[in-house]
Image (cartoon, grey):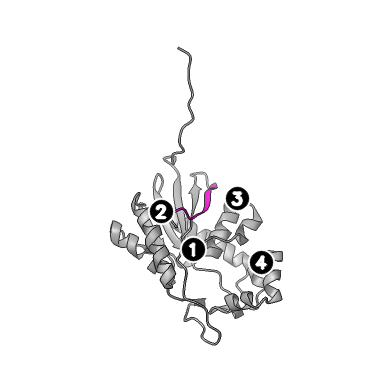
Amino acid sequence: MSERYPQRAWALPDDATEVLLVRHGASQDAVPGEPFEMVEGHADPALSPIGEQQAEAVCARLALAPPDALFVTSLRRTVQTAARLVAAVGVEPVVIPELSEVHLGAWEGGELRIRTAHGDPLVKTIFEEQRWDVIPCDEPMEDFEARTRAGLQRVIDHTGPGRVAAAFVHGGVIGELARQATGAPRLSFIHAENTSISRIVAFADGRWLLRSFNDTSHL
């Protein structure tokens, strides 16, 4: 009988760690003259009613194959998004402040959304130059790169090899980590939908693989 080599489904190597990057649900509307509360320089809105529904959907999906470890940022929209999964699997999330959203400087508190809606020309510059720090007083891109990489490494180290983590984070963070994993600069400014799941596999030799991006099938 001749030898046969069938295609096989992908499986996580024993010495690798998979991290599911879950964007938080939609947050409260930005209202001119009513900036969001701030936490350590970051806007900290709660989830909107739509965001709560999105959170319920993504947590129900993740509960079908529960991750080994859970992580959130210091901002409440990630904590609220993860809450149903935390209750379902009984795993207390670890807070990773380094994975909080990019500091938007003078455009924090919801100002970015308002200026985008009004067609501020600087928004176009952000995307043309692929840099958040064209915004006045924004976090330098090199600093954002370094802290998000350190944050993901904390997740990897805490989770361990052969295991899967779910980290509830932010859109800018997901884009930046996707860029780092692939070396494709424009991934950092491709929009990740609310409660989308993107997967990064970290290998023992230090390589990162972007296995999937912006999966919203649960919605």
Q: Secondary structure at mark 1?
A: loop
- The earlier-in-sequence mark between 3 and 1 is 3
Task: Report which residue position mark 1 lands on.
Answer: 194
Task: Report which residue position mark 4 lands on.
Answer: 131
Distance Cα–Cα, label 1 vs label 2: 18 Å
- The earlier-in-sequence mark between 4 and 1 is 4
Image point 49% across, 30% down: which residue?
Answer: 7
At label 3, the amino acid type is Thr
At label 1, the amino acid type is Asn
Q: Crowdedness of circle 4 by 10 Å Cα count: few (<14), some, many (20+)?
A: some
Q: Position of residue 73 (x, y in %)?
A: 44, 67
Task: Report which residue position mark 2 lands on.
Answer: 165
79 and 114: which one is in front? 114
Image point 37% across, 58% down: which residue?
Answer: 59
- The earlier-in-sequence mark between 1 and 2 is 2
Distance Cα–Cα, label 3 vs label 4: 17 Å
